[in-house]
Amino acid sequence: MINFIIRRILGAIPLLLFISVVTYAMMALAPGGPAAVLGPRGQGLSPEAIARINAAYGLDKPWYIQYFYWLKQLLLHGSLGTSYVDNRPVIEKVFEKLPITIEMVGLALLLTLIIALPIGIYAGAHRGSFFDNASSAVGFVFYGMPVFWLAIVLIDVFAVQLQWFPSSGLSSLGQENNPLDRLWHLTLPVVAIALVSFVSWMRYQRSSIIEAMSSAYIRTARSKGLSERDVLVRHAFRNALLPIVTLLGLSLPALVGGAYFVEYVFSIPGVGYLTFSSIFARDYPTLMAITMLTAVLIVVGNLLADVAYAMVDPRIRYS
Amino acid sequence: MRTVRRFLRERSAVAGASFVIVLVLAAVIGPFLDAIPPNVIDHALIGFPQPPSAAHWLGTDLIGRDEFIRALYGARVSLLVGASAMLVSFAIGIFYGAIAGAASGAVDNLMMRFVDAMLSFPTFFLLLIVAALTEKFSLSIIILIIGLTSWPGLARLVRAEVLSLRERDFVEAARALGASPLRLVVRHLIPNALAPVVVAAAFAIGDNILAESSLSFFGLGVQPPAPSWGNMLQDALTPQAEAAPWMVLVPGLGIVATVLAFSVIADGIRVALDTSIGQETGDADVEEVGPYNPVPAPAS
């Protein structure tokens, strides 16, 4: 197991390097840069000033030299550079937003599972029933629903018309440390994420129940005279949860960056919001840091998924 | 013929197909019939969005533009981008997947590693990063952005299909008759891998429409004043639009209904062709399943 983990981490290094080279090259060749960020404010920078700014960021060198400098900074100093916008270290910028996004998406994931698993299990156990067809029809509708539209509709109904929930932000004035107030602010965003993401979890749970129900051990359980309910709850259910454990690991990157739309519409200052503001400001160091963070999380998530899978399922062995 | 008859027996698929046909006709013909350009501003109505009426079927927006006309133009954009981006991604994905599957060995391994790297990113993140690098957002650029970021899933599908096909007797026979590798791929492998690809194509159009409207909503797609369902929703986000729920409903329901229609069409084709691939309707999460992931594909 330890060997397997070490091998996987070593195997991930070329992947991360590859991703960083490609992203770095694309961003270096794209328009924009610190001079362009400062330009509108500085109004008509002289060519000498632009050259000086670019030299300060090392942008007067070819992109592959810049890349090696970027990599050296990362490996030797753990730095990903400073933002073109406010000159702060980008790692600091990203990590101060991270807890907000994790909190929101974590809650959303919890709500998603609470909705999706029971529906998926029931639909799978009663395949072809009215409930099964109805839930898959509802699933189709939510599948095609843009999450930002759902967010706007929720705001219109619950914040503007009914005024039950706030329409944006994380806290009311003077209530910054009140957890209940925060939860109240997070309700609509969390519901919006859960409603569009429960579909895939539900479908997965449904098909994994169906697969479990057709296995030999279910036939055994039935033939020894267990009630259908016992067969479902004690045998099929437990086995059908295995793929969900894996999916949880794979959804780790989404936990961090998967809520761009919702953060944008509800003005929640998380990583998604930072992504958008960096895009519009062409703040490439920050975008690069977010990309690398996402890439690392993907690798870690995949690894966690495999390890968790081996832990809950004794049939899986890695050598 | 048998396939068509089986498709016609799927009631929801027929409903979806009818909707798409009506939408295509309306989007293509509508603007010509009316001859009203989408950006005519009724100055008397600026700041007073009108609810749906006989004069403005689906109401007007904040600066007095007719929502119905704009939605029709938006439908045209969505359908055009959805279908063209699908063609771009399929042109790349089919060839990439077929070549990887036919080549096998080290080449296949390397090619699929690249696909894995691309697939491991959340779909929209990839889209955002690429869109962030562009300066001009013409329709063709948007189509390219969506097409170039959405082919890897298809490449994997086609490769799997080709791998299972290449062991079949007719491929063996063609090889024995001296067919070149290129001929094998183009004449034998691709045509026979087509069934699941057609299903995936219908799903892809819906996904691309969703992608286009998301990009446009964030100002990284179709640029105002040109109408698109996505940027119409952006207009509806302002506080002044709170009194005008039709501004939210018209473009939003347009997107939902169209994507839903393509999903049920895809599902209908799947049933008609009797293939089990492409039946999962999950979102990007399902696509992100990594190379080492032991999760079984959803059974039908």
Image: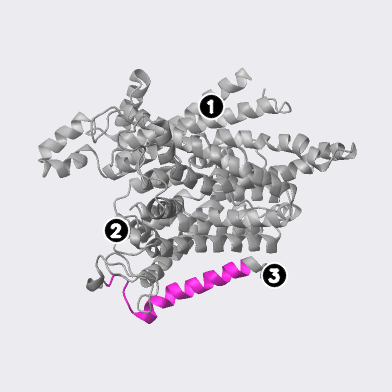
| Residue A267, above or below A142 | above
Residue name at image x 61 percent, y 29 percent: A306
Q: Residues within 10 Å of mark 1 (few under 14, many from 20)?
A: few
Pair 2/3: label in front: 2
Image check: B258 left or right of A291? Answer: right
In the image, residue B156 lies at what x, y percent?
Answer: 58, 46
Pair 3/1: label in front: 3
Please give the chain letter of the residue carrying mark 2: B
Labels 2 and 1 share a subunit = no
- In the picture, the quarter occupied by the C terminus of chain A is top right
Residue name at image x 48 percent, y 72 percent: B24
Q: Amino acid type of disc 3?
A: Arg
Label of residue A296 in the image: none
**Residue B36 is at least partly visible in this image:** yes
Q: Amino acid type of disc 1?
A: Gly
Q: Secondary structure at mark 3?
A: helix
Q: Residues within 10 Å of mark 2 (few under 14, many from 20)?
A: few
- The residue indicated by pointer 2 is B240
- The residue indicated by pointer 1 is A11
Q: Nearer the viewer, residue B183 or B39?
A: B39
- The residue indicated by pointer 3 is B9
In the image, residue A206 lies at what x, y percent?
Answer: 68, 46
User: Does the stretch in magenta take in A119?
Assistant: no
Q: Nearer the viewer, residue B279 or B70?
A: B70
